[in-house]
Amino acid sequence: MAAPLPNFLGLGTQKGGTTTLHRLLSQHPEVYLPPCKEVHFFDQNYGSGETWYRSQFHNAQPHQQCGDITPFYLFHPDVPKRIHNLLPTARLIVLLRDPVERAISQLFHARKRGFEPLPPAQALAAEQQRLASGDPVSLQKHSYVSRSRYLDQLDRYEALFPSGQLLILRSEDLFDQPNQVWTSLLEFLGVSAISLAAPLPRANAGDGLAASLDQSIRDQLRHQLADTAEGVKRRYGIEWAWT
């Protein structure tokens, strides 16, 4: 018997709480997630084929919902159609973090990991030229402001999937209202209601360097992303303190 395909996907956003989402859902006995959090099938490993993808879930039990949480899926422009072709009925989970804080977090994460040699202001200024080059590394590693433009990314999914297959959550609520988010997740996935064992600390939290970012850069990002924040508020009822 062939291994199953996933029933649900965590699409992103990067630096939006997907590691915590993975840890939370891993607590549920009716959910199976691969030991490697980010499978990257629909982006980096798409050429490996469906048999390879199924093999990531070969340890799942028949009663379990299988999931794949890979935050690059939300941003990669080719992924929505690939998902729809293979998993047209999959349930899709999206976490949206304050777009300014998300961009800053990604920038400092990239600097910490050695992906970003430029200082913050120069890195942000270079983003569009880097992305225009078509370099796949820049698409994943240097897309600071672009990844925070949520509406364009969600438009690609909403053009293919009915609204009932998408659950869009405010990232901050994972930590501010964990029980409410937990209930929403379980209802969306159609698994049994169980109590949340314990709220988890923020995974992959930064080292505090982002707080030292020059205020002028933060203000610039708020200006650039104001339309995104307002659009998210209008469309999904999600807002952040500065909007």
Image (cartoon, rainbow, N blue to C red):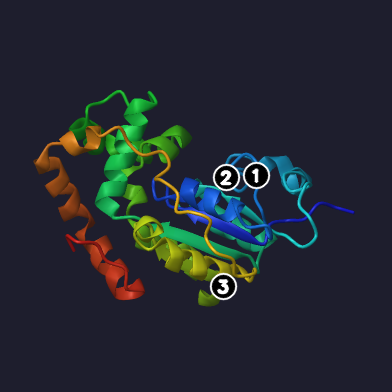
Q: Name the residue under label 2.
A: 43
Q: Name the residue under label 1.
A: 46
Residue type for callout 2 = Asp
Q: Residue 71 location, x and y as percent?
A: 49, 48
- Name above or below for residue 200 compared with residue 238: above
Between disc 2 and disc 3, the foreground one is 3
Between disc 3 and disc 1, the foreground one is 3
Location of the C terminus by quadrant is bottom left
- Gap between marks 3 and 1 measured at Cα: 30 Å
Counting other residues with Cα less than 10 Å from the Cα at mark 2, is it few (<14), some (14-19), or many (20 or more)? some
Q: Residue 98 location, x and y as percent?
A: 29, 55
Q: Which residue is depicted at the point 34% across and 55% down?
A: 97
- Name above or below for residue 148 compared with residue 236: above
Marks 2 & 3, CB-CB < 8 Å contact: no
- N-terminal of the two: label 2 or label 3? 2
Residue type for callout 1 = Tyr
Counting other residues with Cα less than 10 Å from the Cα at mark 1, is it few (<14), some (14-19), or many (20 or more)? some
- Name above or below for residue 183 compared with residue 149: below
Residue type for callout 3 = Glu
Q: Which residue is depicted at the point 34% across and 57% down?
A: 172
Residue 128 makes an appearance in the image: no
- Gap between marks 2 and 1 measured at Cα: 6 Å
Q: Residue 111 location, x and y as percent?
A: 32, 28
Q: Residue 153 location, x and y as percent?
A: 42, 59
Q: Which residue is depicted at the point 44% across and 39% down?
A: 140
- N-terminal of the two: label 3 or label 1? 1
Of helix, strand and loop, which one carries label 1? helix
